Image: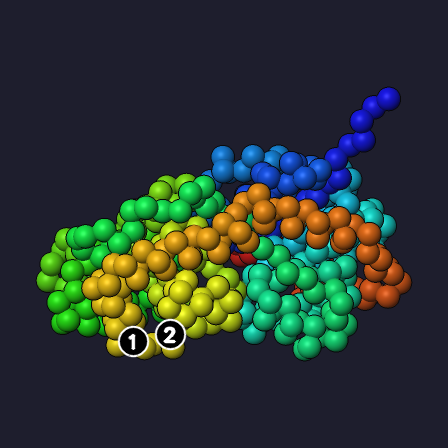
Amino acid sequence: MTAPRNRRAVFLFDIACTGGPLTFVQRASQYLPRFGWETRVVAAGSRRPRSWDASAFTAPLTVTPTAYSAIRLAQRLGRAIAEFDAEVVVGMPNESSVLVMRHLYRTRQSRARFLDVLHSDNPSEYERMRGNADVAAAVGAVNDDAVSRLANEIPSLSGRAYRIWYPVPALEEPPDDKGREGPLRLIYLGRLAQQYKRVLDLAPIVRQLLARGVDFRFSIVGDGPDRKRLEDALAAVSRSPEKVRFFGWLPNDEAVRVLAEQDVLLLVSDVEGQPIALLEAMGQGVVPVVTQLPGMRALIAEGETGFGLPVGAADQFADRIAELATNRDLLRRMSRASWELIYNTHRTAAAVGKLAELLDNVAGLPLPDPKQLPESIYPECICTRFGLPVIVQEVLHWYRGKELR
């Protein structure tokens, strides 16, 4: 008698995907087999970011060939999913996943249920979910506020919105090196971009810390379009080059090792879902001093597991950092409380176990009725309005360098 096979799930995302969603896919696909789910990763597109590392995937990885029309993109992605005979497709934040699921349902090539994922509290993400509600069996969101908002603002998703938990590595024992004497070790980990991340807000915080005589060392891990602006801004306020160090982009395991050597995490964003950098830092006992956004607020018990502050409040950030620099007993207590919270909720084995339970549930949900889906599932453009054949559309997009993904 042969043993029953594992259930099967596909993670589908844009190859340009970076940051938290990419890390989520890598860790979830790696650990799900321990909970009875065989996984495969399908990536749309061919223009890989510099930080994209295929060797980080332990699950089989399929990167679809370049597509220059929506029809060809859907066919190629759909073929990879249908061949795997997946029961659930988990879609990362992009329109390719919805396009291919509509294609599969309309052509009746797959009976996989579609779990769409909301990773950010950006308003455009909620609009994307609204437009995709007819094809998604369920939606996962990275914090409780987002789950409630989905159910309240998109009535058709009521009862189909679920919480997902980012899996992160956490120390097996409470950290014992926080609060030691010497310079306070600060870190920023994330994309170096002013939009959403507001990284230029770090300069006035550093200015105030220097004015107050706080002894610190600031490590900045990440890369992005505003790195040079941030370097210039920090150089203008700090005359001590040893105070600030830029690491650039690091592979995730190296970034976590750098995190483990720090005392305090700074995040100054104005839009987030639930940053993996925040979870990873707390899992290493690093105390967060961050903006008070919904996805962060759920983790921050003020003065116990961290500090949550208004966006742009450089003086308040400096106040809290100075407090931790002078009160090392408080830093040690908060470090242990931060670690304990993540160990119990987001530690990799615990978080992926909850994801496996969600996939079990989603696999049993109803499929959308293909007859209720729109007749035309492909985005309309001027080429389709004029009735140009697909091959002509592809030649035109190729000539203009318009790869679809």
In terms of depth relative to the viewer, which is nearer, 401 or 45? 45
Q: Residue at x 29, y 76 (%)?
A: 316
Give the vertical position of 277 relative to 128 (above or below).
Answer: above
Q: Position of residue 301 (x, y in %)?
A: 44, 68
Point out the image quarter for the N terminus.
Answer: top right
Give the vertical position of 298 relative to 398 (above or below).
Answer: below
In terms of depth relative to the viewer, which is nearer, 70 or 307? 307
Q: Amino acid at mark 2?
A: Leu
Residues packed near mark 2 inside 10 Å, few (<14), some (14 to 19) or many (20 plus): some
Q: Label for residue 309?
A: 2
Q: Amino acid at mark 1?
A: Gln
Q: Residue at x 50, y 62 (%)?
A: 274
Q: Secondary structure at mark 1?
A: helix
Residues packed near mark 1 inside 10 Å, few (<14), some (14 to 19) or many (20 plus): some
Image position of 68 (left or right of 100):
left
In terms of depth relative to the viewer, which is nearer, 372 or 155? 155
Q: Label for residue 316?
A: 1
Question: Which colour assignment does the render follow?
Answer: rainbow
Q: Position of residue 299 (x, y in %)?
A: 48, 64
In terms of depth relative to the viewer, which is nearer, 403 or 25? 25
**Is there CB contact under 8 Å for labels 1 and 2?**
yes
Q: Position of residue 288 (x, y in %)?
A: 37, 61
In whole angstroms, how far apart are the C-alphas of marks 1 and 2? 7 Å
